[in-house]
Image (cartoon, rainbow, N blue to C red):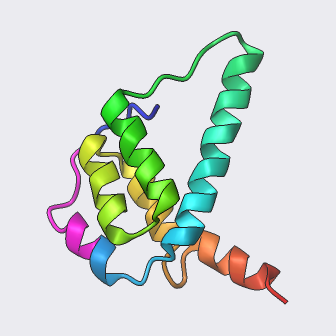
Amino acid sequence: MDDDQTQMPDDWREVLNESGIDFGLAAKVLKEVIHIQVVEAEKTGEVIYCKPDYSRALTAFYETPSAATAIALLECGPSESLLGLFAGCAPGGMFKLFEDVRRP
């Protein structure tokens, strides 16, 4: 999936636990991002591959979006872009603001 395995901030677990992230929204956004990646790969005849442990962690996050399952997902595949997606689902984050505007 995501090859941007970079150095994560030392306190990333605490940030996920304490930042008010809307993990349900994060799961929804992540599903959409992955769907777009799969569709784009199919257009060029490519295949998206996830390691089995990452796939299991991703499924667990989709089924029960929470700080614990987000941490497990990041422990399988540390990713600055995934951490950024979670930040975007915190109060004031771009995905959270967009979702709030769309609600009646």
Q: Residue furthest top?
A: 45
- Against 100, residue 81 (above or below) is above
Looking at the image, residue 67 sits to the left or right of residue 7; the answer is right
- Indicate yes or no whether the magenta region holds residue 13: yes
Look at the image and give the residue range highlighted in magenta. Answer: 7-15
Q: Quadrant of the C terminus?
A: bottom right
Asked if residue 100 is positioned above or below residue 53 in the image, the reply reads: below
For residue 86, side relative to residue 71 (left or right): right
Instruction: Judge by depth and name the residue closer to the eye, 17 or 62.
Output: 62
Instruction: Tell me the residue at 30%/83% (across/down).
Output: 18
What is the tally of numbered marks visible in this picture? 0
Q: Residue furthest left?
A: 10
Q: Is residue 45 above or below residue 87?
A: above
Q: Measured along the vertical axis of the image, is residue 52 above or below residue 7?
A: above
Locate residue 62, reporting x and y percent: 51, 55
Instruction: Give the farthest residue toward the right.
Output: 104
Which residue is rendered at x = 42% and y = 53% of the image?
A: 60
Please provide percent x and percent y for residue 71: 29, 59
Membership of 28 in magenta stretch? no
Q: Residue at x 46, y 31 (%)?
A: 1
Q: Tell me where residue 25 sits by quadrant.
A: bottom right
Picture quarter containing residue 78? top left
Residue 42 horizontal side relative to residue 75, left or right: right
Please give the name of the residue rendered at 77% of the width and 83% of the height, measured from the top-left corner.
101
Of the pair 100 and 50, the residue shown nearer to us: 50
Residue 33 in picture, x, y percent from top left: 63, 46
